[in-house]
Amino acid sequence: MEDMLSKRVLEVAQVLEENKALNVQVLKITGLCSWGDYIVIATGTSETHIRGLKNEVKKYVLSKGDDIKNARNRDDSEGWVLFDCGDYIINLMDEDSRRFYDIEDRWSGGEIIYQSSSSS
């Protein structure tokens, strides 16, 4: 199960990379919290870009049979879209939100299992 989950979040990272997301990072947080095992974080360059990333990630996740627990039909991301996929969380953020919330620092005890070469 763990290998399949790890593969899935790395595939999500690949979808984000293919759609020009910046600074894609996957953190393994198993044992650090009770609600998930991985956090995926990516930066979009604009609200339009984040909306496109959101659509592509949602399409991918649902095509794999995973559930999105907080699915909404709204596009008012205000700089941050979060998908709760159960064992993993996907964060699509604009540069300002990513810098302000600094998820990587908050989860610095996690293991970085993927880091793109592009930065925001």
Image (spheres, helix red, strand yellow):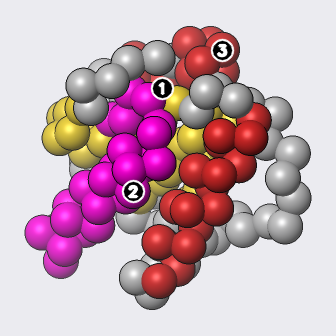
Can you see residue 38? no
Give the residue at x 47% y 83%: 63
Give the residue at x 37% y 44%: 17
Alpha carbon separation for disc pair 2 and 1:
20 Å
Image vertical order of residue 85 relative to residue 101, above or below: below
Residue linked to disc 3? 96
Type of the residue with mark 3: Asp
Q: Residue 119, position in %: x, y?
A: 38, 18
Residue linked to disc 2? 15
Alpha carbon separation for disc pair 3 and 2:
22 Å
Q: Nearer the viewer, residue 61 or 87?
A: 61
Q: Mark 1: few, some, or many residues within 10 Å (few <14, many ≥20)?
A: some
Which quarter of the rendered picture does the N terminus lie within?
A: bottom left
Type of the residue with mark 1: Ile
Q: Residue 2, position in %: x, y?
A: 16, 68
Residue linked to disc 1? 103
Give the residue at x 52% y 30%: 43
Residue 71 painted magenta: no
Q: Main secondary structure of the magenta part?
A: helix
Q: Is residue 67 left or right of 51 when viewed as pictured?
A: left
Can you see residue 82? yes
Nearest to the eye among marks 2 and 1: give it.
2
- Looking at the rendered structure, the secondary structure element under dot 3 is helix
Q: Is residue 90 left or right of 12 when viewed as pictured?
A: right
Q: Which residues are magenta?
A: 1-25
